[in-house]
């Protein structure tokens, strides 16, 4: 009789063809691979240095230009030109150019990351796709070169932490507040090389877009993956975005063995803010209300989706921002939906600057770098020193908190807006 297994163990067993358990090493077959303009250059160089002449499967590789797109320097433009040429020469069918959107948003919108599959990306936030029930994880450029060439990757099967979320979220409190709260509890290394599985009534109540936020920030706890078991909401999302695609979801056995379990009740949870310069330096918004802010950023692979922009617009409607406010939709589809719904008009009328879909200021390279000593309240996922500018200060919060802050020019409680 097979041993009881977690979702991660089951997916990796399927990918490796072996009865693998936590801490085992396996050679796994990858279902989908992704690299963007910031990592594909290194992956392609390694691919060529190892003497590879062809990719393992041109239909399973995705290349996205999103980190510095449109190119902001001649160097970036030249590197992007090189990757366009390589992509075309190898017949890569999933190529997304400037303005199409952020890689992680496109992987789910395009039905490229599916329940029960092993997906790797040359970006640490590839764990986002776990919201669909995939085992999705980030790898380095050299590992991605091996995947490009062979479609396989050595993996250590992670242990799994079970996170149970119960209770009902209050108004203006969302998934970003939940995952920041968990980061504050567990610490930035609290899940090092482990997989997270999210359960409980709160998780079930979250929209798919909010679940993507949960999974996206799993890596900020050191996790290898962050998985939400697929359910009717998952299947409805995929019917909309990928109606012809087939997949086999995986679920943990009832008696699966977990490394640990964390139970969180969200009934009394308020808006959370991660203060500089650690993602686990988390405080209730009341503790930091009044902190002067020079810039607000609403976007990124964490919170640049339609529901996020809609939440911000509901607070900014009929008002005017007090500081520069940069809004970057996560994809062209998000941008179009925001236009059609009037969300973008509301944001622009409030004084926000809207940039083309992509990563924007998140990595400190494009469309909103901070000056010395400036502070930004951002809906992104990282606030390391130098993240958005060499001497900038980054506070992380939800779209609701970001919008409320934009109105006052200082950190504000969105429940008061």
Image (cartoon, helix red, strand yellow):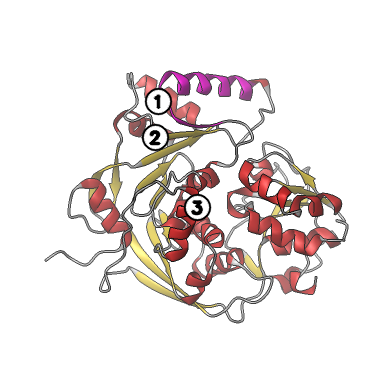
Q: Are marks 3 and 2 in contact (CB under 8 Å)?
A: no
Q: Marks 1 and 3, how far apart in space?
A: 37 Å
Residue that carries the numbered disc 2 in the rendered image: 144
Q: Earlier in the sequence, mark 1 or mark 3?
A: 1
- Horizontal arrangement in the rendering, residue 405 relative to residue 196 (left or right): right
Label 2, label 1: how far apart the Cα atoms are: 9 Å
Disc sitting over residue 46 in the figure: 1
Q: Secondary structure at mark 1?
A: helix
User: Which element is circle 3 on?
Assistant: helix
Image quadrant where one finds the N terminus: bottom left
Residue 240's label in the rendered image is: 3
In which quadrant of the rendered image does the C terminus lie? bottom right
Where is 20 relative to 255, above or below?
above
For the record, the magenta segment spans 75-96
Question: Residue 325: horizontal and vertical position, in percent?
Answer: 79, 50
Q: Nearer the viewer, mark 2 or mark 1?
A: 2
């Amino acid at each position: 009789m097979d041993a009881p297994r977690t979702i991660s163990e089951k997916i990796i067993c399927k990918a490796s063809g072996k009865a693998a358990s936590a801490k085992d090493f396996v050679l796994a077959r990858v279902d989908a691979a992704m690299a963007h303009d910031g990592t594909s250059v290194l992956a392609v160089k390694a691919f060529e240095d190892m003497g590879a002449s062809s990719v393992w499967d041109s239909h399973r590789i995705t290349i996205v230009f999103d980190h510095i797109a449109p190119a902001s320097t001649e160097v970036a433009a030249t590197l992007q030109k090189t990757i366009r040429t390589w992509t075309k020469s190898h017949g890569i069918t999933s190529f997304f150019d400037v303005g199409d959107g952020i890689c992680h948003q496109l992987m789910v919108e395009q039905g490229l990351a599916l329940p029960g599959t092993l997906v790797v990306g040359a970006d640490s936030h590839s764990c986002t796709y776990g919201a669909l029930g995939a085992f999705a994880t980030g790898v380095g450029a050299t590992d991605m070169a091996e995947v490009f060439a062979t479609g396989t990757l050595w993996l250590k099967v992670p242990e799994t932490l079970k996170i149970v979320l119960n209770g009902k979220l209050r108004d203006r409190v969302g998934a970003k507040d939940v995952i920041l709260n968990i980061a504050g509890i567990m610490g930035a290394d609290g899940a090092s090389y482990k997989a997270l599985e999210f359960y409980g009534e709160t998780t079930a109540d979250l929209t798919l877009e909010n679940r993507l936020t949960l999974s996206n920030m799993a890596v900020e706890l050191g996790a290898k993956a962050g998985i939400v078991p697929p359910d009717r909401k998952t299947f409805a999302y995929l019917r909309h975005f990928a109606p012809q695609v087939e997949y086999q979801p995986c679920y943990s056995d009832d008696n699966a063995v977990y490394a640990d379990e964390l139970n969180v009740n969200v009934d009394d949870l308020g808006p959370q803010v991660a203060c500089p310069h650690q993602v686990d330096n988390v405080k209730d918004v009341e503790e930091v209300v009044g902190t002067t802010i020079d810039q607000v950023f609403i976007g990124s692979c964490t919170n640049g989706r339609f529901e996020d922009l809609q939440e911000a617009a509901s607070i900014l409607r009929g008002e005017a921002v007090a500081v520069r406010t940069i809004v970057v939709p996560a994809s062209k589809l998000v941008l179009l939906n925001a236009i059609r719904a009037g969300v973008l008009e509301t944001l622009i009328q409030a004084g926000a600057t809207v940039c083309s879909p992509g990563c924007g200021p998140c990595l400190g390279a494009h469309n909103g770098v901070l000056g010395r000593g400036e502070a930004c309240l951002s809906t992104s996922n990282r606030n390391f020193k130098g993240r958005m500018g060499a001497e900038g200060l980054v506070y992380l919060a939800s779209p609701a908190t970001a919008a409320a802050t934009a109105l006052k020019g200082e950190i504000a409680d969105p429940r008061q807006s």
